[in-house]
Image: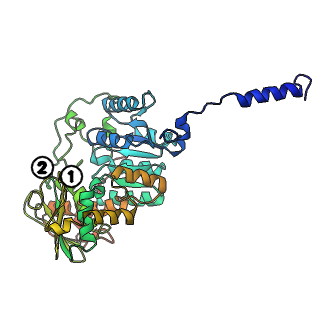
Amino acid sequence: MTASLSRRKFLSRAAAFVAAPYIIPASALGLDGATPPSERIVVGCIGIRGRGLHDLRWMIGNPDVQVVAICDLQKTQREGVKSFIDQHYGNTDCAMYRDLREFLPSRPDIDAVLIATGDRWHAQAAVRAMREGKDVFSEKPSCMTIAEGRAVVETARRYARVYQTGTQRLSEPNHVFAIEMARTGRLGKVDVAYAHIAPWDAAKIPREWKEAQPEPPKEEVDWDIWLGPCPWRPYNEEYARGGWRGDYDFHTSCIGEWGAHTFAQAQAGLGLGESSPVKYNYVDNDSADGMVCEFATGQKLIFSRGDKYWYGSCGERFDGERGWAAAADGYSAPEVSSPDLLRQFDEVIGEYVARTGRALDHMRNFLDCVKSREEPVANARVMHHSMCTVHAANICMWLERDLEFDPATETFINDDEANRLRSRAQREPWVI
């Protein structure tokens, strides 16, 4: 001990230090039901409005999620989302970004991103995010072309990222029941599945530009980023307000609008979630209503625009030797051909949960997989194969002829014109 600090003084000070209360917030320790910071999933958002706000409320309601940033090319949108997030947490911490090229690499603290942009940006943003080490929850339709879907699959694999597309009915009990009834053989051999396509817009979508208007300041709406990989065209405020649907450059048609959901549902029930049909039969109408697609197994997928097989939206139905099962939005319970089939509901759902370990909540399934590093129900491959069905069906309608497709090589057989439509040129610098 030095002369300035005797042993007695040292011991007395040490005792006082030990006796003094050292306060650690209960939330930091995970007490009182709080999630400690080390267990929280840090999330950033890209392009949130409409459906994206629903997803954000869904995600932020989980106590192990901390949303810290919003990236949006429209000032009013990013400020509105920041306000919502700040109010939720009772602070002003949510950061704002206009350009995801700045946002993604500057935030190594972010574990996952929620992407709810327009369709043209889903794959583009997902690939860029996964390259920066982020897991991804992306709204659907999740790619504009077969090539984009393949890029998402390869990026998720290369960077070992968890990816979930927003086909939430794959996690909802009524749909899970119908899918599992078909997949597990409870309906007997299932030869036909029906899938709902959207009752608005058309498959043969136009390519006309809207009237040119003066471009706003970049800080208000960054028009170059809004267009992203799509061909340049003059600004029109209707695009920025959501009026891009039904446009070839920005949308996947009435087939993709709901088929992004229902084809995944139908293919899961057929046990073909990681494949696609090999034959697409052209139908002479503007929506593909009634199109029959055939898998290599001989099983068929039939598109329906109306309510012949369900009521409500985004329905699927499976017809088997022993009966049929169907589900759609608005059902209090699945529809089946016999009450005896519905009595198996609890058993079927219980077996599904026991087999997969998945939550019957699509967002929770994603968050659980972010922690466990397991694959979620709507992983990149499931997304891609159902979207291959979307894109192949669109190409069939555009070319107005039957097509044959090889799911292994993701090419059309003996059809150079169809193969050219598997991808689209991407405008610099938005090339992935």
For badge 2, the amino acid type reads: Trp
Dot 1 crowding, Cα within 10 Å, few <14, some 14–19, many 20+? many
- In the displayed structure image, the side of residue 148 where residue 277 appears, left or right: left
Q: Are marks 2 and 1 in contact (CB under 8 Å)?
A: yes
The label shown at residue 150 is none
Q: Quadrant of residue 345?
A: bottom left
Considering only order in the chain, which callout, 1 or 2, is on the residue closer to the N terminus? 2
Q: Nearer the viewer, residue 358 or 41?
A: 358
Disc 1 target residue: 257
Dot 2 crowding, Cα within 10 Å, few <14, some 14–19, many 20+? few
The residue that appears at 20% across and 54% down in the rendered structure is: 258
Disc 2 target residue: 200
Q: Position of residue 381 (x, y in %)?
A: 36, 62
Q: Position of residue 293 (x, y in %)?
A: 18, 69
The residue that appears at 69% across and 27% down in the rendered structure is: 20
For badge 1, the amino acid type reads: Glu
Q: Quadrant of residue 393?
A: bottom left
The residue that appears at 25% across and 36% down in the rendered structure is: 240
- In the displayed structure image, the side of residue 65 where residue 142 appears, left or right: left
Q: Nearer the viewer, residue 393 or 41?
A: 41
